[in-house]
Amino acid sequence: MRGLPEEFGSYLTYCRGLKFEEKPDYGYCRKLFKDFMHRMNYENDFMYDWVLKKNGKPVDAGINDTKAAALGAARKDSPPEQNRQQIEERKDR
């Protein structure tokens, strides 16, 4: 999956491989994303889009330059502000 961290591809591949009656291994799925957060030096700040929206704040209020850079990792050479713009464009789709 171009432009996304490998963990997202692993997650989607895992989900696509599940049989209809098979129970997902939620521990495995959580570990994928926890490992990603650790690798990116993220701290779980519990600032989810729905929390920000509920509190009347813009959704990007919880995105700092480090997070913006990681989310826009498709172009590692681009500055954080450009990555922030890419994130905003994705939200509008």
Image (tube, grey):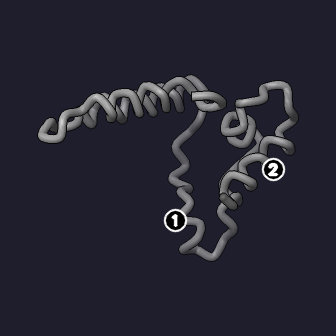
Q: Which element carries disc 2, helix, strand or loop?
A: helix
Front residue of this view, candidates 79 and 16: 16
Q: Which mark is residue 50?
A: 1
**Amino acid type at image mark 1:** Trp
Quadrant assignment, res 77:
top right
Front residue of this view, candidates 65 and 77: 77
Q: Quadrant of the C terminus?
A: bottom right
Residue for point 49% across, 32% down: 8
* Residue that extends furthest to the left in the rendered view of this protein: 21
* Residue 75, x across and y down, in percent: 78, 29
* Residue 3, x across and y down, in percent: 66, 31
Identify residue for label 2.
85
Q: Badge 1 local density, few (<14 within 10 Å), some, or many (20+)? A: few
Residue for point 22% across, 36% down: 24
Real-space Cα separation, disc 1 to disc 2, in angstroms: 20 Å
* Residue 70, x across and y down, in percent: 68, 34
Mark in the foreground, 1 or 2 = 2
**Amino acid type at image mark 2:** Gln
Left or right of residue 68: residue 28? left
Q: Which element carries disc 1, helix, strand or loop?
A: helix
Left or right of residue 12: residue 26? left
Q: Badge 2 local density, few (<14 within 10 Å), some, or many (20+)? A: few
Residue for point 56% across, 39% down: 43
